[in-house]
Amino acid sequence: MEEIQQIEPIPIVLDYWLNASRYAKNEVNGVRKKFHSVFDFSKAGTYWVFGKRFVGKSSLLEAIATHYLLEGATVFDIFSARDNESLAWFRSPYKDIYLVCGDSVDLFFDGDVKPQWCHISEFSLSESEKHDLIITVPSFYSSDYEQYAALSRLVDLLKQRSKWNSIDLLVVRESSRLLASRIMSGKVQNRMEAEYDFIELVQEAYHTGVAIAIDSLRPLSIEISIREIANYAFIKLMGRLSIPKEFRQVMRYVDPLSLRKMPVANFVLLTDMDDKFVGHFSEVPWHIARGEDILELLKIRIEKRVKGKKAEESSPEAPSAPEPQPESQFQEAAQSKHHAIVMLRFSEHLSYDDIAGRLGLKKGAVQYHLERHKNRLCDCRET
């Protein structure tokens, strides 16, 4: 960690506070002095960032992570988008990175980047915490199910920490991915149970020594129990997104148009002590650019495996072999993992036709899932 101590974290600056009456003693001749920080990155805090797309939410999470790295934390940046954005850390000054992949693939490195890595079945929390960053991305798996099962296992290991010497930071890029991983892995049955599971993760954070940094597009996509106990809520540029009533207290201090049109680098911060600030953060220089093929740039090669042995070499962009099709759509519908996916999509208020189109099912198969779910609820009420 001595090398990390020399790296300056990305600045997150609080320019001025909005409810300044509580800090009148910090004013000089009526002019507010710059407030330096209310953050304590040595503790297992919860950081929540929300706002419209392309306003730097993921970049702000990375900036928060650099401050935890300075404190000696291990950062788990495992909920990457389809563009494998978490791998951009290899372009940062933080080089002690440990990769995790599915058991169905092997990783090879043809460029300068040659990190340590392991299959998810070989993953050990005690070994991984010797490194600064733990990263896994969608391209490291043969299927969505394998990826989400691996993510769920990593989360379980963090939830079960009973002793620790330093804080770990879990970075959740878009909260819906965490919920989906718990449902698709079979840990929970539906979105409601996934949200309760998420609440437990946050509530136990101080006891397990896990700080959590989350971003979400819509404020209400995060369960209210998490919204209320988050230590820091960052409001980014909102555009035309609805601003929930619980955040309209900010309107007493900020012009609503400011939230809808403020610069991308700016934010409004609410703390769990009901303090309100306006601040900004510096651009993360290594953050991935849209459309960038980070696998190709880093020369990371992925080889599929068959029954634990290496198969023919395949490039990252090569399509995987099609999975065997079930004899009928309704046999596929009977499988629990497909039931979980359909219920997740239905909870997002999609129509039968939309769900069927996205999952490649017939409309009748979607109806089968919903009837099956209703029957389960009826059985629970009767018991």
Image: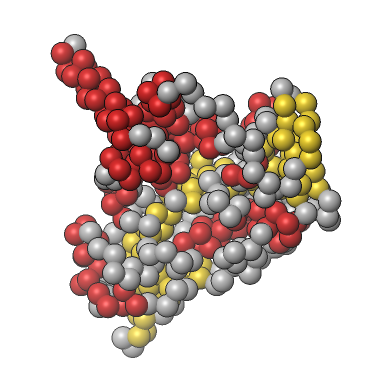
The single residue placed furthest to the bottom in the displayed view is 29
So how many labels did they put on this image?
A: 0
Left or right? Give the position of 337 relative to 293. left
Front residue of 43 and 67: 67
The single residue placed furthest to the top in the displayed view is 383
Q: Is residue 121 visible?
A: yes
Q: Residue at x 34, y 41 (%)?
A: 355
The single residue placed furthest to the front in the displayed view is 327
Q: Is residue 187 visible?
A: no
Left or right? Give the position of 276 relative to 319. left
Where's the C terminus, which quadrant?
A: top left
Which quadrant of the figure has residue 11? Answer: bottom right
Which quadrant of the figure has residue 272? Answer: bottom left
Task: Name the spot of residue 314 as percent of width and height, x first.
Answer: 75, 43
Left or right? Give the position of 191 relative to 89. left
The coloring applied to the image is secondary structure
Task: Name the spot of residue 166 as percent of width and height, x first.
Answer: 60, 41
Q: Residue at x 38, y 30 (%)?
A: 340
Task: Name the spot of residue 305 as percent of width and height, x first.
Answer: 73, 31
Q: Is residue 80 above or below residue 279?
A: above
Task: Name the spot of residue 135 as percent of width and height, x first.
Answer: 64, 45
